Image (cartoon, rainbow, N blue to C red):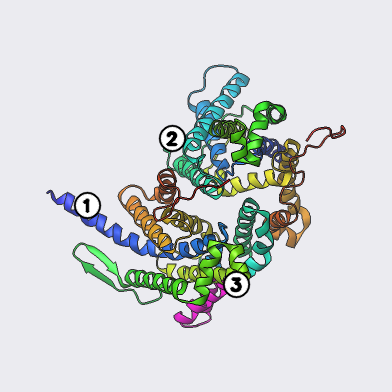
């Protein structure tokens, strides 16, 4: 084995680790997407904008000298509240008109928040500091920072929390019932509107959390939601939309693939990778890696 | 004069684009979010022809060839993306086409020959406003006739109910693929006109935002309505410009007013202003 080849392998490992850290963030955003889709079959294009609003509010909370944990809480609450308001004012009236009008409404909401954000927060990028002091550990030829490890652990914790929530609590069981069959759940006495609002809140709060954690790689700006949102959606579809572990798996796959391509080939192709994977998955298994095939009934 | 002339030019190009998306989205009911990708593919392909490979022919002939090149390039893209993706439906198709549009844009951005992220300059000024409106007129005629033809009725039946259409003997896949390819090709024609009137192309002209704007034009006018598409394109090109003159606050907020109008339209009249109907001066005798 030549020396060069060994360096190449080390490089791959380094990109792989960076990819896992970035994929954790995608996974966090994808979870919200997948929950909302699972429950009302709506591709919520505005999900990335919820993230943006959360991160912006967190940024201003930090600037008001709040400590980091409080700022993260502010971010999660603000994006959650915005999500509930959007669901109540926009998505609920449109829900009965069918899926394509709902999809167009979601795109409209997303655009609205992008331009609204530019007017309210200003178009300049803002930086959020990493949520803990960054330390870099050298392991052989690769570097791992404690921020990356922490992000990965937080994502795992969120996954476990969601698993517990959907399987062992009353509201989680109601969420699953609504996602199986909304009218039947309603007949069983579940307040479906409340459950849907709760799902939006939960998903958007996770997006807000993801937005705050993102501080270590990228800055916050009003247009960030579009790009992140589409990638997170791709992650959700790749894993199998509506399935919670699928979203996490998809997030990791997208994150790792992006970092490998950007590192080994060309960084300007970074944004195209996720779409290539998407088209590939849709060709091979449209229901996603963990999804089950559903036949259309007459 | 130049400013109004520019807007009028865009009106013509957007009429063609909206009609082409209406063929895919309105007639056939396939939800495409990557239309700017086809537009861009056509624009760049035709510009590559007239900048690098132009034959020593008179300008109008070269323009016709450029239009043909734009049509073929975009139609091939439509075919490539259509064959795998048209098996999907609804949301999935929308996202796959969105992804495709972005791939086109990123590929253009990484192609040195066409200027990459700096943009493509020095495209000859072969077309003018007469070209733009003549093409829009021809495409509108084509769409009117298509809507009344047997094939047009077949693809409209796919929009209404795929399973019922298949039972009536409509070949689902071929019809979808045909409308998708032709729709993409017409967007390529619009791209060729855009390239040879603006004389400058930039990858960000063809991003997702523009796919959405074209889609909104289709929906505002009514999915499946030819006259509706024309009116949608005219309104949505002129209104954002007119709002510039409406004074301080409105001018500042015009880009947020736009999505709000879209949402209100979806709540009040999800089928668009005209639905599938046409504006007609005769008494309505057919649907």
Q: Secondary structure at mark 2?
A: helix
Q: Residue at x 48, y 26 (%)?
A: B52
Q: Choose between A286 and A214: the one closer to the eye.
A: A286
Secondary structure character of the magenta stretch overall: helix
Q: Are marks 1 and 3 on the same chain?
A: yes
Q: The disc numbered 3 marks a residue on which chain?
A: A
Query: Cα distance, mark 3 to mark 2?
Result: 60 Å
Using the rendered view, name the quadrant where residue B189 is placed. top right
Q: Which region is colored magenta?
A: A54-82
The answer to whether residue B169 is above or below residue B29 is above
Asked if marks 3 and 2 touch (Cβ < 8 Å), the reply is no
Q: Which residue is mark 2?
A: B113
The furthest residue to the left: A1
Q: Residue at x 49, y 37 (%)?
A: B81
From the image, state whether disc 3 or disc 2 is nearer to you: 3
**Can see residue B47?**
no
- Where does residue B30 sit, x and y in percent of width and height? 59, 41
Magenta highlight on residue A55: yes
From the image, state whether disc 1 or disc 2 is nearer to you: 1
Q: Which residue is mark 1?
A: A8
- Where does residue B234 sit, x and y in percent of width and height? 74, 41
**Can see residue B41?**
yes
Left/right of residue B102 with respect to residue B11 in the rendered view: left
Using the rendered view, name the quadrant where residue A93 is placed. bottom right
- Where does residue A223 sit, x and y in percent of width and height? 54, 59
Q: Are marks 3 and 2 on the same chain?
A: no
The answer to whether residue B55 is above or below residue A241 is above
Q: Mark 1 Cα within 10 Å, few/some/many (few <14, many 20+)?
A: few
Image label count: 3
Query: Cα distance, mark 1 to mark 2?
Result: 31 Å
Asked if marks 1 and 3 touch (Cβ < 8 Å), the reply is no
Q: Which residue is mark 3?
A: A190
């Amino acid at each position: 084995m030549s020396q060069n080849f060994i360096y190449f392998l080390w490089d791959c490992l380094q990109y792989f680790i960076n990819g896992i850290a970035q994929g954790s963030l995608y996974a966090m955003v994808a979870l919200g997407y997948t929950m909302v889709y699972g429950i009302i079959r709506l591709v919520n294009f505005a999900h990335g904008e919820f993230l943006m609003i959360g991160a912006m509010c967190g940024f201003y909370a930090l600037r008001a000298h709040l400590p980091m944990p409080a700022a993260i809480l502010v971010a999660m609450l603000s994006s959650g509240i915005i999500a509930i308001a959007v669901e109540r004012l926009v998505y609920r009236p449109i829900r009965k008109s069918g899926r394509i009008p709902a999809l167009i409404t979601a795109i409209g909401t997303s655009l609205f928040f992008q331009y609204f954000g530019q007017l309210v927060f200003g178009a300049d990028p803002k930086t959020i500091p990493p949520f803990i002091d960054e330390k870099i550990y050298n392991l052989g030829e690769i570097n791992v920072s404690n921020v990356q490890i922490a992000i990965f652990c937080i994502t795992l914790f969120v996954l476990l929390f969601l698993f517990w929530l959907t399987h062992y609590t009353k509201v989680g069981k109601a969420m699953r019932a609504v996602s199986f069959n909304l009218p039947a759940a309603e007949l069983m006495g579940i307040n479906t509107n409340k459950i849907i609002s709760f799902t939006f809140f939960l998903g958007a709060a996770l997006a807000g959390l993801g937005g705050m954690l993102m501080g270590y790689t990228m800055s916050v700006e009003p247009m960030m939601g579009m790009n992140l949102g589409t990638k997170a959606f791709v992650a959700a579809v790749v894993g199998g939309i509506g399935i919670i572990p699928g979203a996490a798996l998809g997030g990791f796959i997208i994150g790792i693939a992006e970092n490998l391509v950007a590192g080994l080939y060309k960084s300007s192709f970074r944004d195209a990778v996720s779409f290539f994977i998407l088209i590939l998955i849709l060709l091979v298994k449209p229901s996603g890696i963990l999804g089950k095939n559903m036949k259309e009934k007459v | 004069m130049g400013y109004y002339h520019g807007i009028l030019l865009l009106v013509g190009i957007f009429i063609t684009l909206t009609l082409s998306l209406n063929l895919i989205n309105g007639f056939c009911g396939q939800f495409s979010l990557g239309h700017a990708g086809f537009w861009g593919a056509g624009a760049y392909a035709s510009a590559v022809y007239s900048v690098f490979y132009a034959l020593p022919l008179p300008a109008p002939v070269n323009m016709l060839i450029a239009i043909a090149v734009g049509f073929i390039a975009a139609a091939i893209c439509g075919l490539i993306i259509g064959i795998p993706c048209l098996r999907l439906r609804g949301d999935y198709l929308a996202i796959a086409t969105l992804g495709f549009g972005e791939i086109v844009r990123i590929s253009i951005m990484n192609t040195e020959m066409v200027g990459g992220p700096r943009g493509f300059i020095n495209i000859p000024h072969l077309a003018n406003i007469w070209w733009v409106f003549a093409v829009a007129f021809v495409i509108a005629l084509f769409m009117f006739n298509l809507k009344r033809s047997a094939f047009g009725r077949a693809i409209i039946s796919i929009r209404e109910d795929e399973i019922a259409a298949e039972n009536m003997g409509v070949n689902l896949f071929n019809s979808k693929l045909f409308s998708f390819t032709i729709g993409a090709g017409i967007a390529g024609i619009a791209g060729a006109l855009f390239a040879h009137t603006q004389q400058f192309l930039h990858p960000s002209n063809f991003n997702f935002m523009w796919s959405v704007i074209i889609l909104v034009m289709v929906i505002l006018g009514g999915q499946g309505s030819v006259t509706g598409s024309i009116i949608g394109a005219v309104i949505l090109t002129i209104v954002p410009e007119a709002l510039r003159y409406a004074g301080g606050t409105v001018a500042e907020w015009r880009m947020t007013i736009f999505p709000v109008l879209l949402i209100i339209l979806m709540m009040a009249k999800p089928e668009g202003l005209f639905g599938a109907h046409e504006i007609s001066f005769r008494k309505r005798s057919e649907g």
